[in-house]
Amino acid sequence: VHLKLLPPAVKSRLPFAVGDFIGKEDDDTSSEEAILASDTAIKKSNYRNSVGHLIQVSLVISGQDLNNSIHRPERCLRAQGHENIVRDTFALEFGEASTLPVAHLTSTKKFEIEDQIIEVDSHSYYWFVGHKELTNSHYKRSFIDIRDRLTGGTAQRWAYISISTSTLSPTESEADRAIIENFIKELATKMSKIP
């Protein structure tokens, strides 16, 4: 059965700047490409601001293969050695009349530095952009995809946008959260074609 491919409502490149953060493209996508379908598109950038905050951003645009283009983020974090993964969700106002549903994962990862084990607190934020829809749920995205394939003969090339940052403090401060949320709003406004 031939399915009509619908592009996601996002730009296909990450912006050079997001607020006061300047991005540097990360060309090393080999680990992702090794496990994802060959028609998956991947872009990554590392963003830093003037005080040294680092935010890593990934844009993954799926191909036709529903099972091998985008995985649940929790699955990827576990494979990278993250533990104590907790998920919550929230919505952000962005643009003139849009609400962005965002998922937030907190996790811990242990690193050995100079014979000491250091536990780093990590924060990941993500959302999915379809042809006309936004969601923060892998299961809702899968449901929409299956529905469209069965009833409309279409396959969406979903965009998965994820943002990651780490801290050595046990919890994320309100100031840190505000920086991230402002970054997400600015990024979503620059990336999205959904009004």
Image (cartoon, helix red, strand yellow):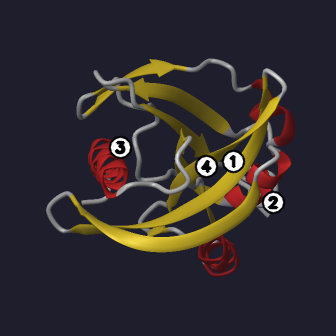
- Residue at x-position 80% and y-position 42%: 36
Estimate the spatial distance between the alpha carbons at disc 3 and disc 1, rounded to whole Å.
Answer: 19 Å
Q: Earlier in the sequence, mark 4 or mark 2?
A: 2
Q: Mark 1 Cα within 10 Å, few/some/many (few <14, many 20+)? A: many
- Give the residue type at disc 4: Asp
Q: Name the side, left or right, on which 57 lies relative to 60.
A: left
Q: Mark 4 Cα within 10 Å, few/some/many (few <14, many 20+)? A: many
Residue 3, horizontal then vertical, whole percent? 69, 60
Disc 3: which residue = 191
Tags 3 and 1 in contact by the CB under 8 Å rule?
Answer: no
Q: Mark 3 Cα within 10 Å, few/some/many (few <14, many 20+)? A: some
Q: Quadrant of the N terminus?
A: bottom right
Disc 1: which residue = 63
Disc 4: which residue = 121
- Residue at x-position 59% and y-position 61%: 105
Estimate the spatial distance between the alpha carbons at disc 4 and disc 2, rounded to whole Å.
Answer: 30 Å
Q: Please, what secondary structure does the residue beneath circle 3 have?
A: helix
Q: Earlier in the sequence, mark 3 or mark 2?
A: 2
Label 3 or label 4, whichever lies nearer to me, is 4
